[in-house]
Amino acid sequence: MRQLLPVLERLANRECYVLNMILKARQFKFVFPRPAMVMGIVNVTPDSFSDGGRFLDAKAAVEHALELVEQGAEILDVGGESTNPQAMPVPEAEELRRVMPVIEQLVGRVSVPVSIDTMKPGVARAALQAGASIVNDVGANRREDAMWRIVAEAHAGYVCLHMQGTPQTMQANPIYANVAREVAGFFLERIQRLNDCGVNPEQVILDPGIGFGKTLEHNLKLLATLRGFVEIRRPLVLGVSRKSFIGKLLGAELGARLPAALACACLAVEAGVQIIRAHDVAETLQAVRMAEAILAKK
């Protein structure tokens, strides 16, 4: 608890810290500070809320991923199971059938890390064996440690995402006494548990989980306090692309949410977020590079 208190007490601090950090993901190494990275989303699913079905075919998914790299994506995040609360859970065999042909083709054709977006240890293991370098785990709130030991064994990067509940229950009635403090406390506790399982802190990326067991007000509060999470001294990834909280706030339909997502991305970069997870890579990269150019003159 003594380790946690200084971080929690500074969550509202508006000062921005330039931190020297290293992120290791198998053969990849990133040194911060550096320009923000964009993680391109590749959904190999029929039911993702934003692009379900568009890239379910492996060939289409690979072509889309290659296009995202051309646009400037520095990480590709491949997922075969939707986290939409209305989507049905996918059996492991089906998730493997969807993602493995895509990962196997990409790792030999791109020079950027390929991330597997999965909650299943078996899928993570297969993807890492095929050459993936990062596990993006929305199930980081689990109790068992099988996933973390797989990550440790492979020396892979690990995205630790905060979620209340499961994808099917997370939006039922999320409640927090103080959402920013509770998410920060979760991160610190998970970093320790990961370390106990052999995952070095240099492998860990933190994701506050916008939209994962949060109301509109919770999401806005987390976005307003991103600067505080910088003090945990691990890279932060933010995913707001096309999410429903934008629609709830602004009345924007799914295809009209990009401007709001770009506003969030630019404010996140100002707060110290190092990775933006996005569907619209070219637009996001242009927005954050402009923000960085302006911030460099302050």
Image (cartoon, grey):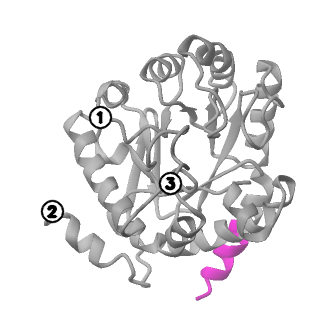
Return the disc, 2 or 3, that comes first in the chain's sequence.
2
Residue type at mark 2: give it: Met
Q: Which residue is mark 2?
A: 1
Mark 1 vs mark 3, CA separation in Å? 21 Å
Q: Is residue 65 above or below residue 236?
A: above
Return the disc, 1 or 2, that comes first in the chain's sequence.
2
Q: Which residues are magenta?
A: 288-298
Residue type at mark 3: give it: Asn
Q: Which residue is mark 1?
A: 143
Image depth: mark 1 or mark 3 in front: 3
Can you give x and y, in whole percent of width and height, for residue 247 in the image?
75, 62
Mark 1 vs mark 2, CA separation in Å? 20 Å
Mark 3 crowd level (few <14, some 14–19, many ≥20, 10 Å Cα) = few
Image depth: mark 2 or mark 3 in front: 3
Q: Quadrant of the C terminus?
A: bottom right
Left or right for 153, reference 133: left
Q: Is residue 289 magenta?
A: yes
For the stretch drawn in magenta, the main secondary structure is: helix
Can you give x and y, in whole percent of width and height, for residue 63 in the image?
81, 29
Return the disc, 1 or 3, that comes first in the chain's sequence.
1
Can you give x and y, in whole percent of width and height, for residue 208 in the image?
47, 57
Q: Which residue is mark 3?
A: 173
The secondary structure type at the circle numbered 3 is loop
Q: Residue at x 47, y 58 (%)?
A: 236
Q: Is residue 114 visible?
A: yes
Can you give x and y, in whole percent of width and height, for residue 222 in the image?
50, 68
Circles 1 and 3 in contact, beta carbons < 8 Å: no
The secondary structure type at the circle numbered 1 is loop
Left or right for 142, reference 297: left
